[in-house]
Amino acid sequence: MHENIIAVFLGAVEGLTEFLPVSSTGHMILAGSMLGFEGEKASVFEVFIQLGAILSILFLYRSKFQQMLDFRYPGRSGQGLTAFHVAVGILPVMAVGYLLHNPIKAYLFSPFTVIIGLIAGAVLMLAAEKLCSRPRVRDVDNMTLKQAFFVGLFQILSLWPGFSRSGSTIAGGLFLGLSRTVAAEFSFIIAVPLMFVACIYDLLKVLNKMNAADLEMIAIGFLVAFVVAYLSVVWFLRFLNRSSLASFAYYRFVIAALSAYYFFWR
C-alpha cells in the first residue's frame, strides 16, 4: 500500500478515535499491526498525527483556554473553569505515567493487551451509565476542583492501551455527578496539555529518527488527523445530548471480538 494512503487512513483513525471513548491508542496499535506499519518510522508518524488531533481541540476551545489563563481565581464552583482545574485533573496521570512509562511501552503495547483494555473500558462505561444518578453539574464552568481531581484519578486507567482516556474520564465524570457533555468537554480540555507534554516527550526521543523523505507522509497524516478530530468532537458532543455511552461500549466489544479472531483464532 502506498505510504500516502497509509497516512490518510491512519490520520483518519487517529482523528476519529482520539477523543471518542473507543481508545485511539488501541485502534492505532491494531491498525498498524494489520497494515504492517510498525517500528521507528511508525513511532515518529504517530507522534505527529496525535499533535494534529490535539490542535483541533485547542482551536475548538480557544476561548475557553484564554479564560483559563486568568489566574485570579482559585477555581471555586461557579467561577468558571480555570487552569487549576486542569492542573489537578492531569497531575495524577502524569505522575503515574512518568513512573511507569517504560514498563507500559515495553509490556502493554500489543494486540492482546489492547483487547483486554477494550473490554474492561466497555464494562466501566456501561456501569457508569447504569449506576449514575441524575447529573448535578450541567456546565463545565461549574465543576469543582474536587471533581476535577477525581476525574483525573479515573484518567489513570487510560495508561492501559485500549482502555481509552476519554472513556475512563467521561465514565468517571458520570460517577461524580457530571452530565455526559460536561464530562466529555472536561476530558477534551485536559487532554490538550497532557497529550502535548506526552507528545513532546516522545518526540524528543524519536527526533533523530526523522527523515526528510517522510515529511510528505507526516504532513498528510497531521492534516487529516486535525480535520477528522475536529469533526468527530463536534459530532460527539451533539450525540451525547441525546444518547448514552452504551453504543460505544458495544462497539468496543465488537472490535475486541474481531481483533481476537484476526490475531489469535483465524
Image: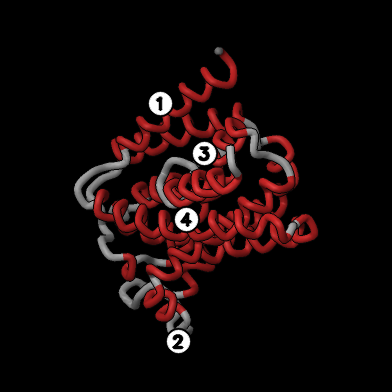
Is 98 situated above or below 67? above
| Label 3 vs 1, first from the N-terminus | 3
- Labels 2, 3: front one: 3
Give the alpha-carbon distance from disc 4 to disc 1, as whole Å. Answer: 26 Å
Q: Is residue 218 visible?
A: yes
- Labels 4, 2: front one: 4
Give the alpha-carbon distance from disc 1 to disc 2, as whole Å. Answer: 48 Å
Q: Is residue 127 visible?
A: no
| Label 2 vs 3, first from the N-terminus | 3
Give the alpha-carbon distance from disc 4 to disc 3, as whole Å. Answer: 16 Å
Identify the residue at the far top of this view: 266
Is 185 situated above or below 166? below
Identify the residue at the far left of this view: 242
Q: Amino acid at mark 2?
A: Arg
Q: Amino acid at mark 3?
A: His
| Label 4 vs 2, first from the N-terminus | 2
Label 4 crowd (10 A; few <14 / some 14-19 / many >=20): many
Percent x, y of residue 250: 35, 30
Task: Check contact, mark 1 vs mark 2: CB within 8 A.
Answer: no
Q: Look at 56% across and 61% down and name the residue there.
A: 51
- Front one among 55 and 171: 55
Give the alpha-carbon distance from disc 2 to disc 3, as whole Å. Answer: 41 Å
Q: Which numbered marker is on residue 27? A: 3
Res. 32 image quadrant? top right
Res. 214 image quadrant? bottom right
Q: Which residue is mark 4?
A: 224
